[in-house]
Amino acid sequence: MKDEKASVNEKSTEFWILVSALREFVSQEGKGFLPLSGGIPDMHASTDQHVALQRLYRDKAQQDVQALSLHVDAILARIGRPGGVHLLRVKENMESMMA
């Protein structure tokens, strides 16, 4: 994520703002890792284990989306753009970027 476009300004598109927020997330909360998507890999487990693991992944993914959203808000404030990007939009974009 060293693309110059990830260095955003007031004219940057929503996509590049999200990329910049993702870069900040990876270097801070993610400690080098992308946000968790919330899906769990195929595996052999009892129903109880699977449900518990699914809940953990979902909760962590929600925390990651919230953190990414805070980065988006901070970036928008830094570049002087009013408003924000709705949390659902952040989640949708994050999922499509990681697909």
Image: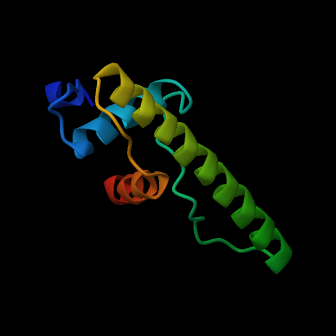
In the picture as drawn, the residue positioned furthest to the right comes out as 48
Q: Nearer the viewer, residue 94 or 49?
A: 94
Residue 48 or residue 10, whichever sits in front:
10
- Residue 89 position by quadrant: bottom left
Q: State whether residue 48 is above or below residue 65.
A: below
Where is residue 86 shown, x and y percent of the image?
Answer: 43, 51
Q: Is residue 91 left or right of residue 49?
A: left
The reply, left or right, for residue 4 in relation to residue 50 is left
Outermost front residue:
82
- Is 43 or 16 nearer to us in this picture? 16
Q: Please name the residue shown 46% across and 24% down the image.
A: 27
x then y, percent, for residue 76? 34, 30
Q: Position of residue 16 (x, y in %)?
A: 23, 38
Q: Quadrant of the C terminus?
A: bottom left
Residue at the location (55% across, 38% down)? 67
Residue drawn at 50 percent across, 44 percent down? 35
**Residue, far top:** 78
Looking at the image, what colour scheme do you see? Answer: rainbow
Q: Is residue 99 above or below residue 77?
A: below
Pick the residue in front: 79 or 38: 79
Residue 38, placed above or below residue 45: above
* Residue 25 as seen in the image, left or right of residue 43: left
Residue 20 position in % (x across, y down): 32, 32
Quarter of the figure that contains the N terminus: top left
